[in-house]
């Protein structure tokens, strides 16, 4: 048997119905706020993306459709689905029990027992009592905490924030917001902007060419590989603080963002260095989302390689053509110059541009270059060969290679090559003798003319000028001129001419006519000059005249001068002997100090001073030797020695100096050679020359052997390691210096004998001349008395 059901009290039903209504209102509020929040955020995202990226209409409509789908799913899930759910009293009771565990599931039991028939084994009084107790407990219970409002508040806060941002965007830019609303529905109305950027590539560049420039499309630009690409951006409206240049490689790679440099008030500029790959380039700045795009295409630029210069010198040089690597041109003015090169691609125009003269020489294509023979025929066929030909200028210049390729690129070669004219120097004449030994001579003497003429490419003539006195023009005659016999087997003309000959003033000025009406005599001054001409065409060059002069003096005056010089030489020898005695005394003193216990270290400075003193002796003797050489030359060519063997000395002079054409005037080596010839018996007896040769030989021996031996001993003494070695060196040095003193004394004796001999001769000549004058006066007086 079953009991009848007990109906729920009205209080319980009202409380459960109230909770159900509150729950549905909360679902409605939460879903509505979520829908508002999602809608505002979607609209803000769309506004931000479209405003910054300026999306095309299809993309905008696609985004709008995606947003509507998302919102539809969100409304269905967050709003409609919760409202459709039907909550029974038992569900509400469970919800209350879960939040109020102190009911101990009595509310659920009361709802279950009061909503249907009672179980068979239940007590109606107990059930009724339970329901009454539950109703009484619900009477004072509050259900404010059953519905949590934190999530709803967060959604409401998000909706408020979204609405605030949306209204803020509309307030900041009403015009832009209105345009966005139109664009939201698919319109293509542009946004209002404060800054408008326009990008451009400067025209008229050698390594950059604009291939296509169509309004509304990307600018197509061809760039030579490795060249620089300048980009300019002009600003209309508000000038932004900075402008970015975006470079995006077309073949993949990292995008680069570069800050452009401001130039002026409304211009920005950037130069891309060494562009090597195809790129997409644009600029952005301020509220301008991006300029027109520039698409670059990299092309192989025209480049020159394998430069060669082939120079054909002027005909007069008789030189073979000269080929050199590189672009440097060094040649004689008037040479034929060919600049040869290989181009990296086929050229439609090319030329050499000279910077100083502003002239241009075109490049012509040729079939082969001189270096092509070393390559295979297959390689030669693929080479673009060009040459430029011009006449070598007389002034220095520089040139660059300007090329325009078939692909439209043109370029001016970065390298600058010099054009350096090689000077054709004028001939150079060097007159070695007459030297210092011939400042004066007698009218009947002879003098050796020894000269050397040189030129870069060839001599044609050598002329000798002479003049009696200091007035009038020099009278020139030809010493040598070029003939067919002077060219060697290779066809090269003579670039050097050496000459040695004896000249007599009497013969030079005899029967010359013109202003020379008399023969040279005592007191005259003879002036001479030698010039040379080269083979330069068309105008030959003349060397600078090499002039020298000779004063003619009486024989007695010449002897007096020579005697005075030898007396001066004698005084120099005496001073040299004094210096040598001082050096020997110094060495003896050092030897004495060393014997008394002085160490090597205390004698270092003294050794240095001794070496310097010995060098003074050598220098003084070298000057004495030069004096003897010049006096010997004067005696030889003024015929002061009447010995028959004097002619053999002249022949030896011409023979030796003919071999040693570059030897200096009055070279000691000749008189050393002559002394050796005398000792070998190949030169006969000499009177004055013999005595002078003996004094020269003594001096030459001192300069070349005796004094150097002392210097070598001194050098060894400075490196001595102990006192014994130093004492031995000092002993040898004293012996060597003693020999030098003995030789100097012999030289002084010979000089004294010479001076006494010359004094006797001079006095004898004076007596002879006095007697001759007396005889002339006596004969004159006798003749008057007889008449």
Image (cartoon, grey):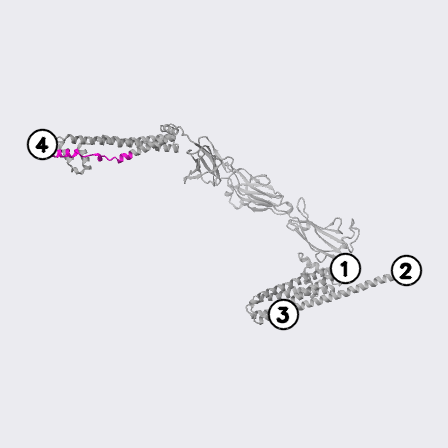
Please give the residue where the numbered disc 4 appears in the rendered image: 3
Q: Which residues are magenta?
A: 129-155
Give the mark toward the camera: 3 or 4: 4
**CA distance for labels 3 and 4:** 167 Å
Please give the residue where the numbered disc 3 appears in the rendered image: 735
What residue do we see at 66% from left, 56% from top? 662
Assess whether residue 142 is covered by the magenta stretch.
yes
> Secondary structure beneath disc 2?
helix
**CA distance for labels 1 and 4:** 185 Å
Marks 1 & 3, CB-CB < 8 Å contact: no
Please give the residue where the numbered disc 1 appears in the rendered image: 557
First in residue order: circle 2 vs circle 1: 1
Please give the residue where the numbered disc 2 appears in the rendered image: 784
First in residue order: circle 2 vs circle 4: 4
**Residue 509 as seen in the image, left or right of residue 102:** right
**Residue 675 as seen in the image, left or right of residue 385:** right
Q: Tell me if residue 530 can be seen.
A: yes
Give the mark toward the camera: 1 or 4: 4
**Callout 4: 10 Å neighbours few (<14), some, many (20+)?**
few
């Amino acid at each position: 048997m079953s009991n009848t059901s007990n109906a729920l009290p009205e209080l319980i039903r009202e409380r459960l119905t109230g909770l159900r209504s509150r729950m549905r209102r909360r679902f409605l509020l939460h879903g509505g706020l979520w829908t508002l929040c999602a809608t505002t955020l979607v609209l803000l995202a769309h506004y931000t993306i479209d405003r910054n990226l300026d999306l095309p209409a299809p993309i905008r409509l696609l985004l709008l459709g995606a947003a509507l789908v998302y919102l539809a799913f969100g409304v269905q899930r967050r709003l409609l689905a919760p409202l459709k759910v039907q909550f029974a009293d038992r569900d509400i009771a469970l919800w209350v029990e879960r939040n109020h565990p102190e009911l101990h599931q009595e509310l659920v039991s009361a709802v279950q027992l009061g909503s249907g028939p009672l179980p068979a084994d239940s007590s109606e009084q107990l059930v009724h009592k339970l329901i009454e107790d539950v109703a009484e407990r619900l009477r004072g219970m509050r259900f404010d905490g059953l519905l949590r409002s934190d999530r709803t508040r967060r959604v409401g806060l998000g909706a408020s924030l979204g609405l605030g941002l949306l209204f803020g965007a509309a307030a900041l830019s009403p015009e832009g917001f209105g345009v966005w609303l139109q664009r939201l529905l698919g319109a293509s109305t542009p946004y209002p902007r404060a800054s408008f950027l326009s990008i451009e590539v400067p025209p008229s560049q050698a390594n950059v060419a604009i291939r296509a420039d169509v309004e509304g499309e990307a600018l197509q630009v061809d760039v030579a590989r490795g060249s620089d690409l300048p980009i300019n951006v002009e600003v209309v409206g508000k000038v932004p603080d900075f402008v970015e240049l975006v470079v995006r490689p077309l073949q993949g790679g990292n995008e680069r963002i570069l800050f452009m440099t401001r130039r002026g008030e409304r211009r920005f500029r950037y130069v891309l260095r060494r562009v090597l790959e195809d790129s997409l380039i644009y600029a952005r700045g301020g509220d301008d989302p991006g300029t027109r795009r520039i698409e670059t295409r990299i092309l192989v630029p025209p480049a020159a390689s394998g430069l060669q210069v082939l120079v054909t010198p002027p005909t007069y040089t008789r030189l073979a053509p000269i080929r050199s690597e590189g672009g440097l041109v060094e040649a004689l003015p008037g040479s034929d110059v060919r600049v040869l090169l290989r181009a990296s691609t086929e050229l439609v125009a090319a030329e050499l541009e000279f910077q100083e003269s502003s002239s241009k020489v075109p490049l012509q294509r040729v079939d082969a270059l001189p270096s092509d023979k070393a390559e295979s025929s297959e390689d030669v066929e693929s080479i673009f060969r060009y040459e430029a030909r011009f006449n070598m200028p007389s002034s220095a210049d520089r040139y660059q290679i300007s090329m325009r390729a078939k692909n439209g690129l043109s370029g001016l070669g970065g390298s600058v090559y010099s054009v350096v004219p090689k000077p054709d120097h004028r001939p150079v004449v060097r007159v070695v003798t007459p030297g210092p030994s011939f400042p004066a001579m007698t009218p009947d003497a002879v003098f050796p003319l020894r000269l050397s003429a040189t030129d870069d490419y060839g001599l044609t003539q050598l002329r000798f000028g002479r003049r009696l006195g200091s007035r009038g023009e020099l009278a020139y005659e030809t010493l040598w001129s070029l003939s067919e016999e002077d060219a060697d087997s290779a066809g090269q003309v003579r670039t050097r001419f050496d000459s040695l000959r004896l000249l007599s003033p009497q013969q030079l000025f005899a029967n010359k006519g013109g202003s020379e009406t008399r023969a040279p005599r005592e007191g005259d001054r003879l002036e001479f000059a030698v010039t040379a001409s080269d083979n330069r065409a068309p105008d030959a060059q003349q060397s600078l005249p090499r002039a020298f002069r000779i004063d003619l003096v009486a024989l007695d005056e010449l002897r007096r001068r020579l005697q005075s010089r030898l007396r001066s030489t004698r005084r120099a020898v005496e001073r040299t002997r004094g210096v040598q005695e001082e050096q020997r005394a110094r060495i003896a003193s050092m030897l004495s100090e060393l014997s008394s216990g002085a160490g090597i270290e205390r004698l270092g400075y003294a050794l240095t001073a001794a070496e310097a003193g010995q060098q003074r002796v050598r220098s003084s003797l070298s000057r004495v030797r030069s004096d003897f050489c010049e006096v010997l030359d004067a005696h030889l060519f003024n015929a002061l020695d009447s010995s028959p063997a004097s002619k053999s000395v002249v022949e030896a002079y011409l023979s030796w100096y003919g071999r040693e054409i570059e030897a200096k005037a009055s070279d000691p080596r000749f008189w050393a050679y002559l002394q050796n010839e005398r000792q070998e018996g190949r030169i006969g007896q000499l009177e004055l020359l013999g005595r002078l040769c003996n004094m020269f030989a003594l001096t030459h021996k001192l300069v070349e052997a005796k004094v150097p031996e002392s210097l070598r001993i001194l050098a060894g003494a400075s490196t001595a390691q102990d006192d014994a070695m130093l004492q031995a060196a000092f002993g040898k040095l004293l012996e060597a210096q003693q020999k030098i003193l003995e030789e100097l004394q012999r030289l002084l004796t010979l000089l004294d004998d010479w001076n006494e001999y010359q004094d006797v001769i001079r006095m004898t000549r004076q007596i002879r001349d006095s007697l001759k004058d007396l005889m002339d006066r006596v004969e004159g007086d006798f003749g008057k008395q007889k008449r």
